[in-house]
Structures are given as structure tokens and as C-alpha cells.
Image (spheres, rainbow, N blue to C red):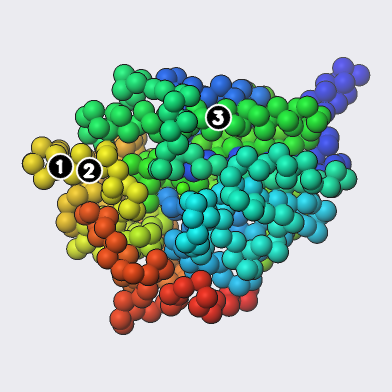
Amino acid sequence: MLRIYLFILVSLPFISINATPPNIVWLIADDVSPDLGCYGRESIRTPHLDKLAADGLRFDRMFSQFASCSPSRASFFSGRYPGSMDAGDMKIPLDDGVALLPAMLRPAGYYSFNVGKFHIGGYESKRPRPGFLLHYPENVRPQFDAVSTVGVVEEWEAMFDARPKDRPFFMAVGFHEAHRGWDPKAIEEFPYSEDDVSVPPFLADIPEVRDDLAKYYSEISYMDAKIGAILAKLDSEGLRDNTVVMFFSDHGLPFTRCKTQVYDSGLHVPLIARWPNGIAPGGVHSGLWELVDLVPTLCELAGAKPANGVQGKSFANVFKDPGAPGKQYVFGERNMHDTDDHVRSVRSEWYQYIENAYPDEMMANAFDLIKSPAQQAMRALYEAGKLPPYQSHAFVTSRPAVELYDLESDPHALYNIADEPEYGDVRAQMKRELDRYNSDLANRFGPDRRYFDVGDRVTGKRIRDSQFPTLRPGSTGPAYSSPDSPKIPFPKE
Ligand SMILES: [Ca+2]
């Protein structure tokens, strides 16, 4: 009898998984690494996210597919790797026929809406600034039941209240924090001093970098406060128990060698999942997973069928068993974002292997980083010969074609060991995995697809009139020059 009683008690939290489909809330940060109090960054004040983690499950090894807004979002909304779609480049519209999570949830009865930043493909030059975050390609808008009209997160409450109350819902909230163009209100309301900052070793420990990092911290705390209001509303409407709340970021922090790059500083992201009906509180999971895995996971919880072509793997079992293993390998890419590149990465628990297709060119960066006070100050040091090699990766004029890092002894990936003979077997094994990725999972375009840079890699100054990428002569691949260009139909699965 005792055994039966214990069985019922242990099973109770999971009984409702298939009974009533859970609501789903995505809280999506912009350019935020796992720099939260609950990830051990105690000087960063994030009380609401810390509470969310205490009430749910913290993932310690979650990775984005691409450290840029549009391709990362196209990937985690579709469950496909960026290199499998033309939307694997910044500002390229989603291919026809690619389904996003809302289209997959609809047959299961879900009502889906997006509020705040979206930014999959396309580019609207409208001002004010939120306009460019709002472009919904024509094949995307109908997949949602409602979308933002002005692109600010503050719309969430009106859209939430307007949802039909008799259906499960999927609400995606795209925060602007902590994308550069930092909000003065964030810095005023949540100030940090340079003493609060810890500088990672790939950045120079100088006042300009500390000041920039302090503002990044302010943006994170500002977002945390907004998240507190959303969580309070779920509580007040009695929705807490059967709503899967997931907080994550599209990619890592907007600093040199982080955003737009494939290192952990660019691709390692936080993920916190809370669902009282299906997740025990206070758990930590240390397996490797990727944001491309979110779509199949949520389809499983919702009783929905993933669309043809979904490439991620469900980690729903981790909710019941945080000690379950993760993936053996995770993958990363860097394609077009202001400047053109073709970088592919595979990471295991302890190693990262990277192939740079254009080793004769300096690291490609995004304009917001190039123009940032931190990067400008570091460039000045580099030009004065005062920056050590392990902080100079963004400034040297050529790169190795192959990089290999031992992340156990070198967690910040500062020392390339690709040519060290004792790592020959590791290098060969990692290359096999990356070749498999390139041939089976991200085979839409190769290094012979070349775009013109839109601006200068050193100054960030615009050098081409078009805001849309244009192919270089002799290049092969999709040839977009504006959102009005005909889209390339997606291959049938
Ligand atoms: Ca972003």
C-alpha cells in the first residue's frame, strides 16, 4: 500500500502532461549570455529570473546556432539549423514553406501571438527603431494568430488579455534588452559601477570595457523587472501550474569575440524552464542542448506534430529526469551579418572544432560591435601594440583555417591547439562530425556563396547603399537584393 501511495505521489506532477496541453510562454532576451544571478553571477541583480530558476530547471549547457538575431530566431522558431535555410543569413527572409512553431501548434488547438522583437528576415527602414525589429515576412505573419503592431514589449498585456480564454496559448515575448542602443532608463534605474563588473579574459580590463559591461548589466536587470510583471500576471490569472515558461536568449553578449562569433562567448545561452505540473523545482541540467531543440520539445509537450524538416531533438525527458544525458555534439555557424563570413563549429563536452572558410580575411563583425566604446578602445590598444594575442582575435588580418580548443583546460577558447600532434585524433573525430553537419544538416550553401560586406570591418562605416546583402560576382547561392526579390521555394522534404 505504501508503495502504491508513493507511486501516486511521485507521479502526480506529471499526470497532466497529456491531459490538458500546457500554455507556452517564451521570454526571449536579446544578446544576453548566462550573466544572471542564478548562473553564479552574483553581482548582477536578477531576482525574478533567480526565482524562476529556483522554481524550475536551469540548463547549464544550452547553445544558440548562430550568434546573430535573425538567423538564430529563424532557427529556434523553426527547429531547423540556419545553414539549412536562406534565412540562415542576417536579414534574408524565411524561405517559402518553412513552418514556425505556431503553425505546428495550431492543429493542437493553440492560439499563438508574438509581442516585441521578432526580426526574422527582411528589414524595414521605418523609424522609430522598433520598426526594423518588426518585419514579418509574408509567409510568417499568417502562421501567428496575432503579432506586434509597434514592436515594444509593453504591448504584451493588451495582447495577452485579448487572447481567447478557451484555448491553450503560445506567447513569444521578444525583449530588446540587452541589444546595443542601450536605454538610458535602464542605466538610471539599475545602475552598476565599474567595480561590480568582472571582465572575461578575452576582453581587455580597461575602464572603457568595464563601463560598457556595467551598462550591459543594467539592461539585464531592467529586463528582469519586466519579466517579473509577466510572471505576476500568470499567477494572478491562475495560469502558473500549467504554463511552460522558458527564458532564453538569441545568443551571447554584444562584445568583441562574442556576438556573431561561434565561441561559447557567442553561442552559450541561458535557458530556464518552469512548469509546476511537469518540472520539479530547483533542478539543474548539465547536458548539451541547442536552441534548435526547443521546437520538437514543445511539440511533444503540446501533443503537436513537428513539421517535416525539423532537425532538433526533443529534450522533454529532461524535465522528468534532470540527470538524463544531453547531446554528444552541438553546432554553430557564422554566415552574413553586416560583413560576410562562412564559419562552422562543432562542440562536444570538452572540445570545440572550428573551420574558417576565409582565413585570409580578418574576423567579420557586426557594426554595433565595431562601433562600440569597448571594441574601439581595444582596437586602439591593438594598434599601439599593447594588446596580448589572446585578446587580439578580432583585429588581426588573418585567421587560422582550423581551430581546436580544449575547453577543459582552456574554457574561454584562447589557445588554438589544432596543430598540436597529440590532439590529432580529437581533431580528426571532430572534423568527421562537422563534415556530417555540413553534408546532412546545413547543406543549403557552401563557402562559394559570397556576399559583399555592407560596411568596413575596421570602422563599421557603411560602404554600400543597399541595406540588403548582394552577391559578389561569380558567387553561387540565393540572390536576394531586397525583400521584394522572389523567394526561393524551399525544397520538398
Ligand atoms: Ca540578438
Query: In the figure, is residue 140 to the left or right of 456?
Result: right
Say whether marks 3 and 2 touch (CB < 8 Å).
no
* Mark 1 and mark 3 residues within 8 Å of each other at the beta carbon: no
- Report the side of 396 relative to 408 (left or right): left
On whether ligand 1 comes within 8 Å of the CB at mark 1, the answer is no
Amino acid residing under circle 3? Asp
Q: Which residue is identified by label 1?
A: 380
The image quarter in which residue 375 lies: top left
Q: Residue furthest right?
A: 1
Seen from the viewer's position, the closer of residues 468 and 392 is: 468
Per the image, the residue denoted by label 2 is: 376
Q: Which of the 4 image quadrants contains residue 265?
A: top left
* Rendered position, 414 above or below 358: above
Please report whichever mark, 1 or 3, sits nearer to the chain's N-terminal start.
3
Residue at the extreme front: 127
Q: The N terminus is located in which quarter?
A: top right
Which residue is found at the position 56% from the left and 66% from the top?
94
Residue 484 is situated, as x and y percent measured from the top left of the image, at 52, 75
- SS at badge 1: helix
Left or right: where 217 falls relative to 160: left
Q: Nearer the viewer, residue 14 or 202?
A: 202
Q: CA distance from mark 1 to mark 3?
A: 34 Å
Percent from the top left, x then y, of residue 181? 41, 43
Task: Residue under label 3, please give it.
Answer: 224
Query: In the drawing, what numbered circle is on residue 473?
Result: none
In percent of the image, x 42 and y 23: which residue is there? Answer: 191
Of helix, strand and loop, which one carries label 2? helix
| Tag 1: amino acid | Ala
Identity of the residue drawn at 43% across and 71% down: 445
Inspect this view and state whether residue 401 appears. Answer: no
Image label count: 3
**Residue 184 picture location, percent across and down:** 43, 33
